[in-house]
Image (cartoon, coloured by chain):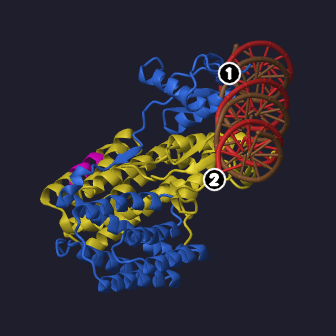
Chain colours: A yellow, B blue, C red, D brown
DNA sequence: CTTACATGGTTATCATACAACACTGGTTTC
DNA sequence: GAAACCAGTGTTGTATGATAACCATGTAAG
């Protein structure tokens, strides 16, 4: 035995990985509402884990309302797939693929937000962004204060889009990303990096102030790319 | 054994009851953040259930972010009750500005999703998209079936990005948008429009099949622009 | 045709064992 | 005396097998 990390690679708990897998099958439509899931035995066999692990995974999905099960019959995909809330499982984020996906999603939103902000920002928006940047300049790199103002800067950019939901979504995603980064302890500290990061922010700000959407997009893309490197996410993206 | 329903009376699953009990302990402050939970053995004994049931309960609480556990150490109450949910107020969406914002957000995601899908789609993804398109062709324009497969098509595109959260986010946003459109009853019916819409979808599919990200982006943009017109959202976007 | 029973399959739960890991305390080594 | 090593103990993580409760289905008896 002992080789259990073939189908699902070691990371968090096995039950988490199994739950994510099933969850994805549902999200991507390979398992449709009303469908019956394979039996616990079969699932255990296909994932190469014990039936116990499968049960823990199912218990979670059940609590999330994604599936329901009945003794003697089986487990089924729930009809009503989405309520009015969107949740992101914290544990699932421990997987590199999940984190990467969320990072990518964040990137899409940030980049487009920067472009929109360049076209719509008001004078007040600019003031807020500049303030955030100044505060960040005074905070030691990597400190809690620094991270806070970093997030604040991005928030002001999102707000400048004028889109009522941009801030909400972006902050929601960013918070999850930040948590994961902090949890992994994957940070380097250096004064050089502080200067680089500040420079990237400045470039974004300049582009937004100039009203140049394309340049803002590029600047934000460059910034996120740099951030990914600093966090050790380099080169994992194909192409 | 066989007498297991003393402490927790029979209702749903035992693991649910145990999870609720622990959850209550936390909510009422008898277990404070940072505190270590009793061992699984002790919990099993206290509740009069097997350790297995306790583990399922803990798995749920862990996925909810209420507690965390580490092998060899124990389980602890989490510091921050993670706000891992995002909600959109339905009533707020009645306002035009809110709806427009959400529509814009959806557009950003859809457009970039199409571009990513063009680069990453597998053969299965293409098959799924084509299936959805065929089904839509057979459904009468504006019917429930038609709307359903329309959504399904966009879902397959999102799935083709390979991004684990793209489907979740996009469907969440799209559902809200669709609800609002249905509620407003703002639809026109016409066979011409059906053909136009199908053509737009076909163009997206072709671009994705060809692996042309830029074209996919443009095609999706055109489609959403057309959809906005059909819903009566024309010309409200500055720029 | 209806009812009762038998049978197989599935989930729910229990029980036990082992592996992986964390912590503690003593022993050895320098 | 201090640091490194090591064994022991407790805890979570996982595997495995067994039993009870329950559902669905088919079959025989009425």
Residue A237, disc? none
- Report the chain holding disc 1: B
* Between marks 1 and 2 in the image, the one whose residue lies nearer the viewer: 2
In this view of the protein, can residue A201 be seen by the observer? yes
Side of A219 relative to C30 (left or right): left
> Residue A89's spot in the image, x, y percent?
50, 46
Viewer-closest of C13 and B190: B190
Discs 1 and 2 lie in a common subunit: no
Q: CA distance from mark 1 to mark 2?
A: 31 Å
Q: Nearer the viewer, residue B74 or A132?
A: B74
Q: Eyeballing the image, is A236 above or below C25?
A: below
Secondary structure under badge 1?
Answer: helix
Q: Tag 2's secondary structure? A: loop
Write the residue at 74% across / 19% down. B1
Badge 2 crowding class, 10 Å Cα cut-off, few under 14, some 14 to 19, many 20 or more, is some
**Pointer 2: what residue?**
A37
Mark 1 is surrounded, within 10 Å at the Cα level, by few (under 14), some (14 to 19) or many (20 or more) other residues, namely: some
| Magenta residues, start to end | A130-137
Residue B156: percent from left, percent from top: 49, 69
Q: Position of residue B159 (x, y in %)?
A: 51, 66
Q: Is residue A132 magenta?
A: yes
User: In the rendered view, does B199 fall on the left or right side of A61?
Assistant: left
Quick check: is B53 in the magenta stretch?
no
Residue highlighted by disc 1 = B41
Q: Chain of mark 2?
A: A
Overall secondary structure of the magenta stretch? Answer: helix
């Amino acid at each position: 035995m002992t080789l259990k990390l073939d189908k699902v690679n070691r990371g968090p708990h096995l039950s988490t990985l199994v739950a994510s897998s099933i969850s994805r099958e549902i999200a991507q439509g390979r398992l449709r509402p009303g469908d019956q899931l394979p039996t616990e035995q079969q699932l255990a066999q296909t994932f190469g884990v014990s039936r116990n692990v499968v049960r823990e995974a199912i218990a979670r999905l059940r609590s999330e309302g994604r599936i329901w099960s009945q003794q003697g019959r089986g487990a089924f995909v729930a009809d009503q797939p989405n309520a009015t809330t969107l949740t992101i499982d914290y544990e699932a984020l421990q997987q590199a693929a999940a984190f990467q996906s969320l990072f990518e999603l964040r990137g899409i939103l940030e980049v487009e937000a920067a472009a929109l902000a360049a076209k719509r920002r008001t004078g007040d928006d600019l003031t807020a962004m500049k303030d955030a940047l100044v505060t960040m300049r005074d905070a030691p790199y990597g400190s809690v204060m620094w991270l806070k103002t970093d997030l604040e800067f991005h928030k002001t950019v999102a707000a400048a889009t004028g889109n009522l939901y941009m801030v909400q979504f972006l902050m929601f995603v960013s918070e999850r990303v930040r948590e994961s980064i902090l949890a992994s302890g994957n940070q380097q500290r250096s004064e050089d990096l502080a200067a680089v990061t500040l420079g990237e922010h400045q470039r974004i700000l300049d582009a937004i102030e100039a009203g140049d959407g394309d340049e803002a997009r590029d600047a934000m893309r460059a910034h996120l790319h740099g951030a990914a490197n600093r966090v050790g996410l380099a080169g994992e993206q194909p192409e």
